[in-house]
Amino acid sequence: MKGFCMKYEPTWESIDRRPIPPWFDEAKFGIFIHWGLYSVPAWAKKGTYAEWYWNALTRREEQTLAFHTRTYGTNFPYQDFAAGFRAELFEPEKWADLFARAGARYVALTSKHHDGFCLWPSAHSWNWNSVDIGPHRDLLGDLTQAVRARGLRMGYYYSLYEWYRPLYLADPRRYAVEHMIPQMKELIERYRPSLLYADGEWDHPSDLWRSTEFLAWLFNESSVRDEVVINDRWGQETRSLHGGYCTTEYGEVGGGKELKAGRKWEEIRGIGASFGYNRNEELADYLTGRALIHLLITIASKGGNLMLNVGPTADGRIPVIMEERLLEIGEWLGVNGEAVYGTKPWRVPSEGEYVRYTATQDSVYAICLRWPGGELVLDAPKPTRGTAVRMVGLERSLAWKHEDGKFRIEVPQLSPEEMPSRHAYAFKLTGVK
């Protein structure tokens, strides 16, 4: 592809010219995984992130401090959670099978969150990684192997900063040069990710992080230079402006910036309100399968990807409610995937409250977020001599007419057993404009 053969300079002007590898836009749906020492307490006050447990404890956030004192006592530092992070029930093949059955095309694991604990035996984090202590296992490497065996792409989240590493607190510039960049290069060359999701960039501008220097190496010299996808979190000034695709989080654009028109973007969120597993959340705090399917459809209609997070338990299980939600999405995509994977936004992304559009080179998909009844009436599509309509999941063509400026599709009467899917219904329109 044009753009991958050029040499990139360590400037944003040069880095921003690199095109995003096509696989990412085509994938549409990925799985995010937040797993680490914070999965042992697995607790946060409602509506907040459980993976920020150490930070909340250090800040003496009232509810977190009360929970910690009540549960672990007053002399239990965060580091002691390593003994409880054993991952004894972790079966990476089962995780990978679940993600494949969910219809995901890529996976991103927290290689290192803001607490600095690594899920691989990093030479730059001695005795603060999952091989030296805790599980005594290369969790990242084992999952990477299993995910790729199922034909999915593997990527990693990496936090640029570490809350309490002494070198970072004393001299962030030295930290970036002596710790962060060497560790990222180690991660890249050892595991060869398809995606690198940076985070924790907000305390400093990108020049302190030496971001353009690292990215020039990544795109010019690394073993994944042609395949790897990056996001936009590389300095306090970069979100929505520089790097790779734009990121939104629970529907919000970082830093108060707007998404650039036509630029690739991705929404990240949990099934509940937290990324790390939060035992304080209840059923009502989790989105339903229907809501998640509708979210994926709406994001795809606007040209985005959804990377939906799961928060495993400390012993290595994906909570059953999260598993159920993923399989519900996968059931829908198993029938309707052609209306999502590899599609582009159409000239009209939506119509009314319940219709979303996606498009391929020769077809338009009208995806209804509720059953349309006996007739689906659309304003946007205009028929041609070769127009044909079918409901995805059914073999037969559907009758239609264009009358009074309306495109009217005759919807078949179906019993519940005959319904091709639940929660949303895709109609494939060929030969429309």
Image (cartoon, rainbow, N blue to C red):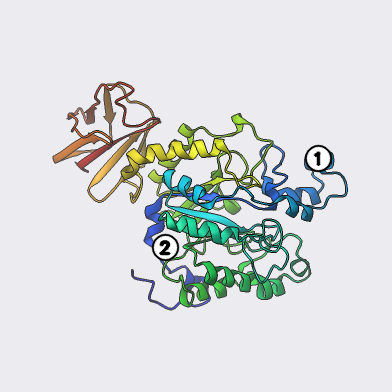
Drawn side of residue 171 relative to residue 365, left or right: right
Classify mark 2: helix, strand or loop: loop
Q: Which residue is situated farthest in the left direction here?
A: 385
Badge 1 local density, few (<14 within 10 Å), some, or many (20+)? Answer: few
Counting from the top left corner in percent of width and height, residue 183 is at: 62, 70
Counting from the top left corner in percent of width and height, residue 48 is at: 67, 42
Give the CA distance from mark 1 to mark 2. 46 Å
Q: Residue placed at 28% from the left, 49% from the top?
A: 360
Q: Residue placed at 76% from the left, 70% from the top?
A: 167
Q: Residue placed at 71% from the left, 41% from the top?
A: 44
Residue ID for mark 1: 71
Residue 240 in view (yes/no)? no
Kind of residue indicated by mark 1? Thr
Quadrant location of residue 262?
bottom left
Q: Which mark is residue 20?
A: 2
Counting from the top left corner in percent of width and height, residue 275 is at: 61, 46
